Image (cartoon, rainbow, N blue to C red):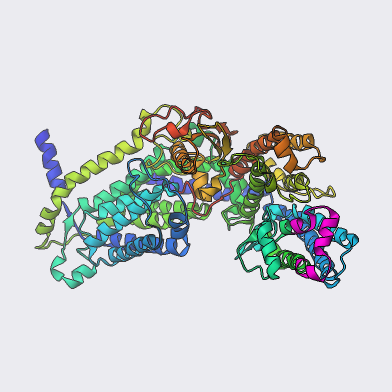
Amino acid sequence: MRTVGVALIAVVVLLTASSCHDAGNGTAIDTFDRSAMLRGVADNLIIPAYRTVDDEALGLTQLSVTFVDNNTVSLFTLDTLRSAVRTLTLHWQAVITYDFGPAEGPLGSLVANVSTFPANAAQIEAFIALNDTSFQSFQRDTRGLASLDYLLNNGTAEEIRLRFDGQANRNRRNYAKALANAIYADIHAVYIAWTGPYRQQFIDRSGTDAGSSVSLLFNSLNIGFELLKNFKIALPLGKRAGQIAAEPTKVEAFYSGASLLLARAQFDAAVNMWFGRTVEGDTFASFRSYLKTVTNGERLIADTETQIAAVENAYTALGESVPLSTLVSTNPAAVEPLYKELQKLTRFWKSEMSSLLGISITYSSGDGD
Amino acid sequence: MAISLRGTIATYLHRTISPAPLALLRVLFGCVMTISCVRFILLGWVDEQYIRPTMHFPYHGFEWVVSLGSPGMYIVFGVMTAAAVGIMLGAWYRVCAVVFFLCFTYVELIDKTYYLNHYYFVSLVAFLFCWVPAHRSLSVDVWRRPTLGVDAIPQWTIDIFKLQIGFVYFFAGIAKITPSWLIDAMPLRIWLPAQTDLPLIGPLMTLWWLPWAFTWIGMIYDVSVPFLLSWKRTRLVAYLAVIGFHVVTGMMFQIGVFPLLMIGMTLVFFSDMVQPRSGLREARVLREARGHALALLLFFVVQVLVPMRYLVYPGELLWTEEGYRFSWRVMLMEKAGTSSFVVEDRATGRRGHVDNATFLNAHQEKQMSMQPDMIVQYAHKLHDHYESLGMKDPRVTAEVWVTLNGAPSALLVDPNTDLSREELGFHRYNWVRAR
C-alpha cells in the first residue's frame, strides 16, 4: 500500500515536471490570452464608446446653456438640441453592454440612471412647475434621456417651441438643461474612471472566477440583452406576464419614434462585442475567438451566428418607416418574430457560453466540492 | 457465530482511547465553523441569500421551514457563531453542539439553491458531535467542573468521524467511475483551461492531457484515501495527498472554507497516536455513551442508502438530478440552463412571459434553471402570484434549455406540461424529458 502512495506522489511530481518541460514545445492545447481580449474590448469598444457619449453629452450641456439664457427659442435652436439628443441616444446604445465596474454607482447603474424609460410625464411637469431640478428623488423616470425625449419631441415642432419660448417658460428650459447636466455628470464620471486606473485593473483581472473582468463582461452582455428583449420589445408588445394588452407608450423613445432604431443599435453593439469588431471594421479577439479555443466552441459559434442572423432578419423585416409604438398596436404579429428570435438567442449567450468558457456567474459556487 | 459477533461488538464498544484526539477535533471543527459563520455574515450573504429574496426553495417535506427575515436571520447567525465558539472552547458544549446543529441545519433547509455537499457534511458532523463526549478534555467545561474530565473515552466516539469522512471520499470516488468523468474528462476539460491565471500552476492548465490526469487521479484518490488514511503505514503519505488535493482544488474553485475543513477534519485519522491512560473515571463515560452506538448504527445505514437511492430512478442522473443531492457527487458536471416561463390566464387564454429576475436572485435563477424540483416550485410560486393579481388559475409552462458538460442545449422539461399542476415528491417526474 505504501507503494501506492509513493506511486501517487510520483505521478503528481512527474506530471508537474513533464508539463513544465512540455509547455515550451507545443504540446499544449490552443491557449487563449484573456488579458489581450480584455485589452482589445476595452481599447476598441468600451473606452471609445464612453468617449463618444461623453463628448456628445458635453456638447449637449453647452447647447443647453444658450438655450436657457435666451428667452427666444427658435425652431433652429430647438432642432439643434433635438438632433444632439437623438445622436447621443443612438450612441448611448453602445455603452449599455458595458454597464459594470465604474458604471455601478451607489445610486444604481449608469444605464438605470441615464436611460430608464418610459418617462413619467406628469411628474416631470410637476417638477417643472416647481422649478425643482434637484433630482433628489429615486424617480429615475423623471430624468435621463427618456425625459429629454419627452420634453423635446412631444408634439409638433411649433408646439414644442412654444412650450419653451419666453421668460414664462424658463423653468422648462431650465429642466432640460439640468437633465443634460446630470446625464453628462453621470457619463463623465464613468468615462474618467475608464481612462484612469480602472482600464488596467480590468485587463489584469483576467481570471474566470466571479468578479473577474471576463465574468463582468459576460454578465453585462446578458443583462443588457435581457433589457433589450424584455423591456424594449416584450413590454410594449404586451408579452410580459400580467399584461393584458400591448402598451405602445412603454417603448424607449416614445416621442421621437426612434425605438426600433435604438433597439437595433443596441443589438448591433452587442454583436460587435461578440465578433470583436469596431464600427469601423477593425477586428480583435473577443468572446468568439475565445470560444474557438475551447472544447465544443466551434459548434456554439455556428449556432450563435445562425441565430444572430435570424434576429437581424427579423429586424430588417420590420423596416424603419413605422415606429414600434404604432406596430405593437396595429400589427403586433409583425413584431412577434423579433421577440421570438431574440428569445432563441438567449440560451447561447446566457447558459451555453458561460458553460463552455467555465465562467463563474455567482460568488458562492453552485456545485462546490 | 451470533454470539461471537455480539462478543466482537461488545469488545469493540468497550475499547477506549484518549479523549484528547476527539477534543482536538472539536476545537478544529469549532474553529473552522466560527470562521465560516463570520465570513458568511461579513460577505453579506445573510442578507443576499436569506433576507432579500422574495421566495425560497425549501426541501420536499420541509416547506414549513421559512426564513425569519431581518433581524431574525442575523440573530440565528449570531447564535450559530456563538455556538461554534462554544464548541471550539468546549464551553457549555452539549448545549452548543445541539444549538449549532439546529441553527446550521435550519439555515440549510430554507433554500436548496445554496445546497453544497460540504454544508451537508457540516450538518452531519455537527449531528455526530451532539452524541459524543468531546468536551471531557481540553475544554472550558472541564476547567469549570474538573469532575467532568476523563482519561479515556470509548473508541467508537472518534471512529464515527473517521467513518463519516471515509463515506464522503468513498462515495465521491465511486460517483466518478463514469464514462463522462474518466473517458471524456468532463467537466474538467472545460474547467482547467479556464484556470490559466492561477499562480505557479496556471500555465500548465492548457496541457491537453491534464484533464485526464486530474480525473483519473481524482477518482483513485477519492476511492482509496479513506483506506490509506486508516492504515498506519500509508497514513502520512495519504494525509500529504489530502493537503495537496484540497490546496489545489481550493485554489482552482470557489469553494470557500471546505478545503480548510477537510484538511482539519482528516487529522482525526491520527487519533491512535495518542495512547490512552488508564483512569478511574472512564467506566462512567462508557456506560453513559454505549446506548448511543446502536442509534448511530442506524444513522450510518441511512448514510449508505441515501447516496445509492438514485438507482431506483430511471434516466440519466446528472440530467434529471433525481437522487443527486446528499450523495457526495462533487465537481461532476458543468451544467447551466436558460429558462423562460409562460403564464396563461385560464379564462382569457392570454399568455405572458415571466422575467425571472422579478422573483429570483441570480443564484436562485441559475440553480432553478437546471433542477426539475426547483422548476416546479417556481411554477407554483408564479401560479399563486399571478392568481393573486387577478388571473384565473394560471397555466404555467416553461421552456428550459439546459447544457450539460458542453453538449448543445436540450429541453429539460416538457414545454407543454402545466407545471402548476405537478406536485413535488419522491416519485419519478414524468414531465422531465430525456436528453
Magenta-highlighted stretch: main secondary structure?
helix
Residues in magenta, as a range: A148-172
Q: Position of residue A351 (x, y in %)?
A: 59, 41
Q: Using the image as rendered, state which of residue B362 and residue A358 is in the foreground.
A: B362
Q: Position of residue A5 (x, y in %)?
A: 41, 47
* Number of marks in picture: 0
Question: Does the magenta segment cover residue A166?
Answer: yes
Q: Position of residue A237 (x, y in %)?
A: 66, 40
| Quarter the N terminus of chain A occupies | top left
Q: Using the image as rendered, state which of residue B65 and residue B271 is in the foreground.
A: B65
| Residue at the extreme front | A168
- From the viewer's perspective, is B187 left or right of B62? right
Question: Does the magenta segment cover residue B343?
Answer: no
* Residue depicted at x 20% and y 72%: B143
Visible in this render: residue B399? Answer: yes
Q: Is residue A22 above or below residue A202?
A: above
Q: Is residue B146 above or below residue B250?
A: below
Q: Quadrant of residue B20?
A: bottom left
- From the viewer's perspective, is A74 left or right of B143? right
* Residue depicted at x 36% and y 30%: B427
* Residue depicted at x 38% and y 50%: B110
Visible in this render: residue A298? Answer: no
Q: Position of residue A250 (x, y in %)?
A: 67, 48
